[in-house]
Every structure is written in structure tokens, then in C-alpha cells.
Image: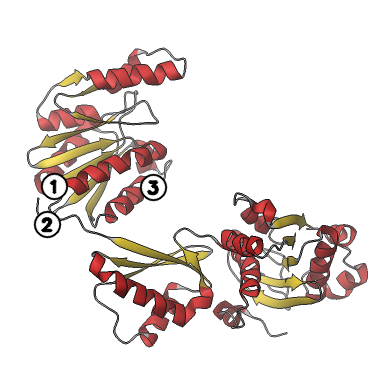
């Protein structure tokens, strides 16, 4: 088949998607996996559990697409219609498939279940369909040609789909005339927005090579920058662009691939034989949670203190009552004493302390909602900063937690440059 003209369309099924009870993440997963072999999705349609609508849509897709991936509708219940619909569109009867029956028998036996009539429905497939193994669930996938279009049917359960996509994508790559050697270099950053990053690149790079595709994926707390090339010959240009980004805003680059902030900080701590403690108020233990999600975090993380109420700040971390009375909980003296108390209690080498106004209530003229004081560093060398993130409560907590970790990352790396978000979010004292 001609790769340049190869067209993929997605047909997503299910009333639960149409109603919003289930959020569609499967189409993004399919598109990402196809993107790895430089195959794009041209069109995506979602249809509820309606036989007539599904038949009409699938028949229309099969006349224009080279490949249609149908997602959902393979289960044992009456509203699982995909096999019936594909058989009707292909003009073939439904028939019990021996491999699908054997799969169901093995699946039930492994779980000490009896294969009932409802489950057996999942083996009733369009005659002539080829099986796609499902290593997790009860429903096999299947594929069948409708005219010049290949229709591939996959389960709606995300974990099952994920487990089956490797074989689907590998099979597709083998059928392409010229499989693309796509390579995607993903950089994880913190403290940059898409527009800011794009402007820095536009101002700092005169001739961006055409063979390197630049892409952004915004998120919280990190933003991903993607450098994509489609040939091995373009790999040096990709690396040259990577070097340019390092020059332009390398202090904001956390790592490559799926690296998360907490993971990067722990790697640095463990490499230096150092440990970290946290003293949290407005983030409610989120920093500690981010750290302990990383396997092996105990080698670099010693203790976390969630001291939300003022009397707990005093009783647990030794924050002076007169300091709280004079300056309030959201203040520089308090976060300094929180950090010092956490270092003393835990025996760790580094500390992060945060206290802020997460909102939506509780702000004042001098400390509006979104205000936070951070302290970080080691004994005798603690640093502080007052920042303002006037965003929704959960996002505020996420960004503050990441900022605290970023300060330790920067200190461990010896980065002297002030972060751009400090310039944007700092509040004059």
C-alpha cells in the first residue's frame, strides 16, 4: 500500500462515552501508538449503541479508509454490538470461532469461572474474521476486510487495548511499503508555558531544520517538548536541536522520556548520598506523595510532615507561637522555622517547606489567594521566596509542590540562574 495516502479512521462505540460517564482515552492511545510508525488518524467518530447508526458509519468509513479501528462493543452484554455490525457491513454471517471459544475456556478456567452463554457470545464473530489475541481480558479482538478496507475491532477496556496494540501496530508496520524510522525525543520541562517556549525558540534559532518536527504538550505541572524525525539520517539534526534547547532553557529541562520531577530529584539525591525532608501546610502532603510514588524513594526521602494547623506547626516542628502571632502562617519566618524543624526532626540533608493560601477563601489584601512562601535548602543555607499562583486550588497545590521540588533540583545541580517562573510569579515584599 502507498504509505503517503494511507488513511486510518477510528470508530468509537458506547453509550457511556456519548453520555460522558466514560472519558475517551483510548483514541489518544491509538493515535500515539500509530504515530510511532508515522501513521496519522485522519478521522474519528463516536457512536452510541445503535445498530443502524453503527452500520451506516462503518460502511461509510470502509469506502474511504484503508484501515478502520473499531474500539468497544466486544463484551458479553446485549449492548455490545461490534461483531454483529461488522458482519452485516461485510455481508457475512456470524459464526462461533474455535480460537475465541478456546480463549474463553482458558480465561474462565484460570479464574475458576463457568463459561456461560453470555460469555460465549464473545466467540460469535463475523465468518472469516482473523483473531487478535487479548492477553488480559475475555474478549478477543478480530479483523476482517470490507472491500479494500481492513477493519480491526478492539476492546474498550483501556488495559486490554494497550496490551493488544503492539501486535496491531507491528502488523500494520509490516504491511507498509516503506516503514518510517520515526524517532521522537521527548523533553520534560517545568516552569515554561507553550507560548513562552515557542517565542524563545523563534528568537533564538534562526533556521530550524525542516526535517525536525517541533511539538508541545502542555500539562500540570510539566510541559513536554517533542522533537520528531522520520529518518535515521535526520538524527544528527534532532540532536542539534536538542542542544539548542539546552542552550536556550536548559535549566528548565527536567529530563527525557517520561521523567517526572520527583524522580529527577530523587536520582540526584541518591547519586550524592543525600536525603530530603518536607514540611507542608497548603499542599497537604502532596510533595511527599509525589516522592513516595517513585520506587526506591526511601533511599533519598526521609520524612514528610503535614503541619496544617498552627498549633501543629509549633508542636511538631517547633515553629514559635510568637512568630505565628506576629507574621501569620503564610510568612517567611514561619516557612524558615518549618524547614529548620523538619531538618532537625528527620536528620535529612535537605528540606522543602511550604505555607500558602490555596483558596478559594482565606485570602487578604496583603496575602491574596494563591500566595505561597517556599523555603528550601540545607542547615545554615536555607533560601526563601514568595510566589503568587492565582489558580484553582488543586492546580495551585500541584504547581507549588513541583516548584518546591524544582528548587531542590536546581540546588543539587548547582544552577545559579533564576527560573523564569520566579520572575513571573514573585511578589515584592
Q: In x, y percent, where is residue 295?
A: 60, 49
Q: At x 35% / y 42%, what residue is drawn? A: 18
Q: Earlier in the sequence, mark 3 or mark 1?
A: 3
Mark 2 and mark 3 in contact? Answer it, CB < 8 Å.
no
Q: In this orientation, which residue lies closer to the viewer: 131 or 426?
A: 131
Q: Earlier in the sequence, mark 2 or mark 1?
A: 2
Residue 297, disc: none
Residue 11 visible in the current orientation: no
Q: Which element type, helix, strand or loop, lies under badge 1?
A: loop
How far apart are the alpha carbons under marks 2 and 3?
A: 26 Å
Residue 427 visible in the current orientation: yes
Mark 3 and mark 1 in contact? Answer it, CB < 8 Å.
no
Q: Nearer the viewer, mark 3 or mark 1?
A: 1
Residue under label 3: 25
Q: Nearer the viewer, mark 2 or mark 3?
A: 2
Residue under label 1: 66
Q: In x, y percent, where is residue 10?
A: 24, 46
Q: At x 9% / y 45%, what residue is drawn? A: 63
**10 Å neighbourhood of mark 1: few (<14), some, or many (≥20)?**
many
In the shown orientation, is residue 182 left or right of residue 275?
A: left
Quarter of the picture holding the C terminus: bottom right
Residue 5, disc: 2
Amino acid at each position: 500500500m502507498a504509505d503517503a495516502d494511507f488513511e486510518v479512521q477510528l470508530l468509537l462505540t458506547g453509550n457511556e462515552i456519548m453520555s460522558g460517564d466514560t472519558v475517551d482515552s483510548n483514541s489518544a492511545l491509538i493515535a500515539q501508538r500509530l504515530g510511532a510508525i508515522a501513521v496519522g488518524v485522519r478521522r474519528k467518530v463516536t457512536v452510541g449503541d445503535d445498530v443502524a447508526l453503527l452500520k451506516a458509519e462503518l460502511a461509510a468509513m470502509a469506502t474511504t479508509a484503508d484501515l478502520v479501528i473499531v474500539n468497544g462493543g466486544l463484551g458479553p452484554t446485549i449492548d455490545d454490538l461490534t461483531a454483529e455490525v461488522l458482519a452485516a457491513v461485510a455481508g457475512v454471517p456470524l459464526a462461533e470461532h474455535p480460537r475465541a471459544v478456546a480463549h474463553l475456556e482458558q480465561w474462565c478456567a484460570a479464574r475458576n469461572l463457568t463459561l456461560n452463554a453470555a460469555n460465549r457470545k464473545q466467540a460469535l464473530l463475523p465468518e472469516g474474521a482473523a483473531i487478535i489475541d487479548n492477553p488480559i481480558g475475555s474478549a478477543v479482538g478480530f479483523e476482517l476486510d470490507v472491500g479494500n478496507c481492513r477493519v480491526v475491532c478492539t476492546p474498550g477496556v483501556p488495559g486490554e487495548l494497550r496490551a493488544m496494540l503492539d501486535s496491531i501496530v507491528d502488523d500494520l508496520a509490516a504491511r507498509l511499503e516503506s516503514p518510517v524510522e520515526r524517532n521522537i525525543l521527548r523533553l520534560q520541562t517545568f516552569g515554561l508555558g507553550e507560548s513562552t517556549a515557542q517565542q524563545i525558540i523563534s528568537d533564538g534559532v534562526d533556521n530550524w531544520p525542516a526535517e525536525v518536527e517541533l511539538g508541545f504538550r502542555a500539562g500540570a505541572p510539566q510541559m513536554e517538548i517533542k522533537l520528531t524525525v522520520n529518518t535515521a539520517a535526520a538524527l544528527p539534526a534532532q540532536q542539534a536541536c536538542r542542544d539548542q534547547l539546552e542552550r536556550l532553557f536548559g535549566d528548565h529541562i527536567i529530563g527525557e522520556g517520561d521523567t517526572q520531577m520527583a524522580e529527577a530529584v530523587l536520582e540526584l539525591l541518591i547519586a550524592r548520598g543525600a536525603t530530603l525532608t518536607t514540611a507542608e501546610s497548603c499542599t497537604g502532603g502532596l510533595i511527599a506523595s509525589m516522592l513516595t510514588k517513585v520506587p526506591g524513594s526511601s533511599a533519598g526521602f526521609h520524612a514528610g510532615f503535614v503541619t496544617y494547623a498552627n498549633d501543629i506547626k509549633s508542636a511538631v516542628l517547633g515553629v514559635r507561637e510568637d512568630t505565628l502571632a506576629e507574621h501569620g502562617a503564610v510568612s517567611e519566618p514561619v516557612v524558615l522555622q518549618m524547614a529548620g524543624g523538619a531538618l532537625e526532626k528527620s536528620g535529612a540533608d535537605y528540606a522543602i517547606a511550604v505555607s500558602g493560601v490555596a483558596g478559594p477563601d482565606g485570602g487578604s489584601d496583603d496575602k491574596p489567594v494563591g500566595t505561597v512562601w517556599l523555603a528550601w535548602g540545607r542547615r545554615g543555607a536555607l533560601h526563601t521566596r514568595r510566589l503568587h499562583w492565582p489558580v484553582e486550588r488543586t492546580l495551585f497545590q500541584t504547581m507549588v509542590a513541583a516548584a518546591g521540588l524544582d528548587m531542590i533540583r536546581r540546588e543539587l545541580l548547582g544552577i545559579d540562574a533564576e527560573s523564569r517562573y520566579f520572575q513571573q510569579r514573585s511578589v515584592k515584599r
